[in-house]
Image (cartoon, rainbow, N blue to C red):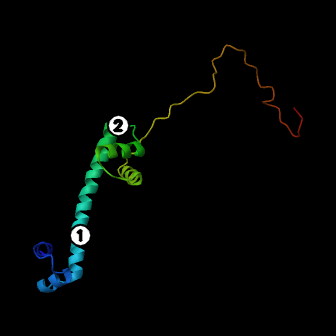
């Protein structure tokens, strides 16, 4: 109501409008921040949906690539915020580590027995 009155009468200050309508000026500013928080919440939900859509479309993307993709689409967002959103939603890239065997036990060469296996050593240079 005060915002409408301010648009109709821009020469009047906020304090005089609040006084005319019988409300506290602090209430007006608190109400404004609540309305702006609602708009920010809607933007945050939209950003979360965009991040989730990107990650589901490209499962190998990390937060850096998602940030760049969001910038290409038109979102102006920091990489730290994207990382926080991806952590909260458990959308971080989970790469599979492939096991690489480093020992070839099936070689054609002769294997030698361990002669020191049953020997108990009590001093240096005993073997």
Q: Residue at x 25, y 52 (%)?
A: 46
Residue at the outermost top position: 108
Q: Where residue 21 sits in the image (x, y, percent)?
A: 12, 83
Q: Where residue 106 sits in the image (x, y, percent)?
A: 63, 18
> Mark 2 or mark 1: which comes first in sequence?
1
| Image quarter (top left, top right, bottom left or bottom right) of the N terminus | bottom left
Q: CA distance from mark 2 to mark 1?
A: 36 Å
Q: Where residue 13 sits in the image (x, y, percent)?
A: 19, 81
**Judging from the image, what secondary structure is the residue with disc 1 in?**
helix
Q: Which residue is mark 1?
A: 34
Q: Where residue 110 sits in the image (x, y, percent)?
A: 72, 15
Q: Nearer the viewer, residue 103 or 48?
A: 48
Q: Which residue is mark 2?
A: 58
Residue at the outermost front position: 11
| Image quarter (top left, top right, bottom left or bottom right) of the C terminus | top right
Could you say which disc has been placed on residue 122 in the image? none
| Picture layout, residue 3 above or below residue 104 | below
Badge 1 crowding class, 10 Å Cα cut-off, few under 14, some 14 to 19, many 20 or more, is few
Classify residue 54 as left or right of residue 32.
right
Quarter-of-image position of residue 52: top left
């Amino acid at each position: 109501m005060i915002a409408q009155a301010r648009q109709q009468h821009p020469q009047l200050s906020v304090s005089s409008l609040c006084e005319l309508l019988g409300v506290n000026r602090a209430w007006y500013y608190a109400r404004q921040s609540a309305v702006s928080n609602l708009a920010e919440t809607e933007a945050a939900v939209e950003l979360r949906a965009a991040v989730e859509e990107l990650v589901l479309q490209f499962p190998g993307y990390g937060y850096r690539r998602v940030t760049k993709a969001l910038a290409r689409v038109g979102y102006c967002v920091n990489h730290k915020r994207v990382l926080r959103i991806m952590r909260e939603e458990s959308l971080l890239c989970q790469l599979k580590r492939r096991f690489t065997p480093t020992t070839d036990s099936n070689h054609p060469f002769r294997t030698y027995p361990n002669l020191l296996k049953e020997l108990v050593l009590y001093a240096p240079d005993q073997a």
